[in-house]
Image (cartoon, grey):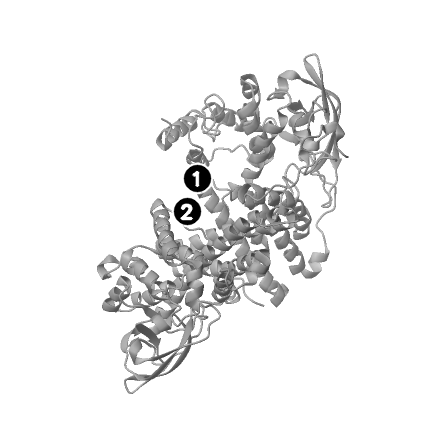
Amino acid sequence: MTDAVELKRRTAELLAAHPPATTDRQTFLKARFDAGLAWVHYPEGLGGLGAPRSLQAVVDAELEASGAPDNDPRRNGIGLGMAAPTILKYGTEEQKQRFLRPLWVGEEIWCQLFSEPGAGSDLAALGTRAVREGDSWVVNGQKVWTSGAHNSRWAILIARTDPDVPKHRGITYFLCDMTDPGVDVRPLRQITGEAEFNEVFLTDVRIPDSRRLGETGDGWKVAQTTLNNERVAIGGMRLPREGGMIGPASRTWRERPELRTQDLHQRLLKLWVDSEVARLTAERLRQQLVAGQPGPEGAGMKLAFARLNQEISGLEVELRGEEGLLYDDWTMRRPELVDFTGRDAGYRYLRSKGNSIEGGTTEVLLNIVAERVLGLPSEPRTDKDLAWKDLAR
Amino acid sequence: MTTERTQPDLLYSEEEEALRAAVRDLLADHCDAPGVIARTESDTPHDLAAWKALADGMGLAGLLVPEAQGGQGATHREVAVVLEELGRAVAPVPYLTSAVVATEALLACDADDLLAELASGRRIGALAVALNVAPGGAYKVVRHEDGGLHGELTAIADAVVADVLLIPADDGGLYAVDASAATVTPQVSFDLTRPLATVTLDAARGRLLGDAEPAVRRALTAGAGLLASEQLGLADWTLTETVRYLKERKQFNRPVGGFQALKHRLAQLWLEVVNLRAAARNAADALARGDSGAETAVAVTVAQAYAASVAVHAAEEALQLHAGIGMTWEHPVHLYLKRAKADSIAYGTAGAHRARLAELVDLQAP
């Protein structure tokens, strides 16, 4: 049985065989993966030990205390948070062996080729085509809002393989090699000035059938695993008090008494309370998960944090007065990851506008809460029985 | 303020869920909506039969009192669950006022006999501080002169059913006065289920219990923190009931609950209730653990700065979405709106709690 004691023993063994002080980072991470201590709830041989997920914290604490390198999870958020659980659930044995290890150690970064100019909230309406030719699929189309595509080695991709059936049924899920000919990544400059996202043009890209994930035509079902994991990711965070955007705003308030007004004080206090309550809600959700009683609260966390980020950063721009009229840098940078707290309030204000759009718009998520949590009737679906090719667009 | 403490336990234990089920059953038998509405129009708005069942039958009046002093030796966490259920039923019983606020005041004093009486439910106590006073807020006192108490105190919740009144006096003492020695006059109250009264003392004899200031502060802190759980129960009931109604009610040949404009409002409300649950549990847990004064104060002020807007919003949305029927006297939604609005003032408004929080977390006013 793999319990906390056993995990501590294995962690000590790993540290003894590969002392962090004298072991190269990648070597250590690979050894950690091979020891089953990467994500303990994954199966043996795939970086885990089939242990309860909650015991990961035991391993992480031991490793952190010993100064071991971590796998910098923010750098490969889509790989770890979305691609990996989907590959684990739907991948062939060969796919799991090939992809999970380099993904976890960060040798291979992943991005997500889902959204299209014509398919955002209505993702299942996507039009990127994949046509079978012998042992391969030939893919043509355009994806958009692809964060990190310029750094990525692999992508999870959904494409239409049958236009003659209703939209949800004609989609197939692929693992796409971003270095293949025909994959063209173009920076998409955003309101912040930087190009964290991309457009990706796919022209006659050949994907071997061995990189199909799940059955042909089953891509929507596979994508649900990806999307559910995307939304769960935010709920698992453990924030300290003032750990989110309220932190920099509160510090500015404390350090700059000359900026204070009565109106801003009232608004700041209200947002401080809302932030603390959201933090407690996230903590409660985490405790429910650990206790094996997951609640539907996760559906709400993304909505709460999107609103808070936007309101707090907006307040902070105002709080800064004259400085709020300035901006730190409009250069078109191409960051590896989004840095919410390292830049000025103006940047945070503009970037957080995306929080209520990315990963499901606030409007769509409210529908999901209303229908799946409260059980209210669903929206009328006029496209349900129509073949994709007959849809209005 | 980023100092970490041990994580609060924000879940419900199995025992707490069992307690909830028992209280809910009891209230289903005693406190149905038509009964509560009829009672509000009578001379006896309080449901003393329900109170007796809760206090005598289930021993819930003594949850906060240690067993050695005649109570159940439970904690604020269990009390919070009871209050959630009482809020769901807008039950007209003096639980928050007697079993929480008056009891906490006595726990701060040396008054074991009275404490045991309140814990058993044999007598009902009321702290004679106006219901709107926040923890740490200024409260009115009566004159102590020639061994008697003189003066008038207003907006004393549940005083009409109290057997013993806890009276703060101008000499800094807290006095126990038998209700028969005072004149208690009902006021016409906005919240019909937690009526207020004036207490008039004319040379009334009281027994000195101890210092008023720490006792009142402790009582109001617990009252404010646990009121959030009552507000949670109230908000939860109004949301659940509104969702149920909107699935049934048809207009334009569709269930009204299928219109996106309404779905988004209800989803929004659900988010607020979920948040309130975390905040209320956190306050109850902090009180139960007797955390450092500042940490409990933060938990209580955060809960109270958040709870009122949610409970009022939930009740107001319930009324609007029930539309015409929500405006009638026979539908219970008005009881919830009145309770929610009164609760938004009870033990300090959200604004008062935010002002207190500004000091606690060093976000000073200009």
In the picture, the quarter occupied by the C terminus of chain A is: top right
Would residue A153 appear left or right of B183 to someone viewing this image? right
How packed mark 2 is, by other alpha carbons closer than 10 Å (few <14, some 14-19, many 20 or more), is: some
Residue B365 x/y as whole percent: 56, 67
Task: Tell which of A74 and B207 is nearer to you.
Answer: B207
Residue A86 x/y as whole percent: 56, 27
User: Do the residues under discs 1 and 2 have CB atoms within 8 angstroms?
Assistant: yes
Q: Which residue is mark 2?
A: B11
Q: Quadrant of residue B207?
A: bottom left
Q: Amino acid at mark 1?
A: Gln
Give the number of marks. 2
Residue B41 x/y as whole percent: 44, 69
* Residue A358 vertical placement versus A46 (above, below): below
Would residue A3 appear left or right of B360 to someone viewing this image? left
Task: Tell which of A256 and A325 is nearer to you.
Answer: A325
Residue A256 x/y as whole percent: 60, 62
Q: CA distance from mark 1 to mark 2?
A: 10 Å
Mark 1 — on which chain does it sit? A
Callouts 1 and 2 in the same chain: no
Task: Tell which of B1 and B248 is nearer to you.
Answer: B248
Query: Which disc, if any, is residue A293?
Result: 1
Mark 2 — on which chain does it sit? B
Q: Amino acid at mark 2?
A: Leu
Say which element carries label 1.
loop
Q: Quadrant of residue B76?
A: bottom left
Name the residue rendered at 58%, 64% in the picture: A266
Q: Residue furthest top?
A: A134
Would residue B330 appear left or right of B289 to someone viewing this image? right
Query: Which disc, if any, is residue B149?
Result: none
* Residue B310 vertical placement versus A382 (above, below): below
Say which element carries label 2.
loop
Name the residue rendered at 34%, 71% in the picture: B161
